Amino acid sequence: MHPTLIPRNWLLADVAGAKNAVYVQSYALGPSLYYGAGAGMLPTAMSVVSDMIEISRNLVARRGGAPSPTAPYSQVARPMVPLADVRTRYYLRIGVREQPGVLGQLMTILGAHGVSIAQVVQEDRAVGREHEPVRVVVLTHEAREGDMRAALAEIDSLAVVCEPARVIRMAQ
């Protein structure tokens, strides 16, 4: 679980105010959304987890309206995908010195690690703030987490980088 930017047209994007939602992708059910009034971080998490445990118990015990399976449930272990192999799009924000060639350095490192760029925006330097860093915002195409992390380690070590890269994964 991690923070993720989501498309505006997703149902989760409409969750507002004191409402909470949980989006779950499962093999048996497919995508599902659970939505309701929020009760604060801890009570909501406890409620969701306890509901999931109760549903599992009911399925195993064949109670609570759960259909009786015609064959035993398959208990095939499914391996977790290593985090380094997860593929997604990324939002990056990097604070850099405003000088010629900086953008080229950043893009060259990303490209060398197999990270393709979808969009780049570099803010203008503010008048009277010549000594403050400018932000470069990068949206990538789908990339491997391991490649992205390797690129960011190299980028963060550059002398022109004043603020380490901030990264948010983007749902597709």
Image (cartoon, rainbow, N blue to C red):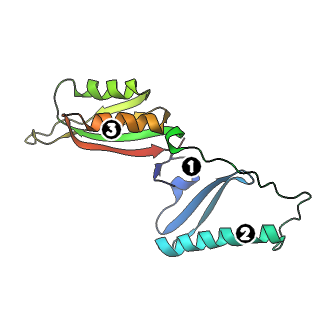
Question: In x, y percent, where is residue 160?
Answer: 19, 34
Q: Secondary structure at mark 2?
A: helix
Please tell me how crowded label 3 is: few (under 14), some (14-19), or many (20+) other residues with Cα within 10 Å: few
Instruction: Kindly indicate the quadrant of the structure image that contains residue 109.
Output: top left
Answer with mark 2 or mark 3, whichever residue precedes in sequence.
2
- The residues bearing labels 1 and 3 have C-alpha atoms spaced at a distance of 32 Å
N-terminal of the pair, mark 2 or mark 1, is 1
Q: Is residue 54 above or below residue 88?
A: below
Residue 30 is situated, as x and y percent measured from the top left of the image, at 71, 51
Q: How many marks?
A: 3
Look at discs 1 and 3 and give the one toward the viewer: 3
Q: CA distance from mark 2 to mark 3?
A: 43 Å
Q: Between residues 90 and 79, which one lies in front from this camera angle? A: 79
**6 to 71, vertically: above or below:** above
Alpha-carbon distance for marks 2 and 1? 26 Å
Residue 10, which numbered label?
Answer: 1
The secondary element bearing badge 1 is classed as: loop
Residue under circle 2? Answer: 55
Q: Residue 153's mark?
A: 3
Mark 2 or 1: the one toward you: 2
Q: Amino acid at mark 1?
A: Trp
Q: Amino acid at mark 3?
A: Ala
Q: Residue 3, image x and y in percent?
A: 45, 53
The mark closer to the camera, 2 or 3, is 3
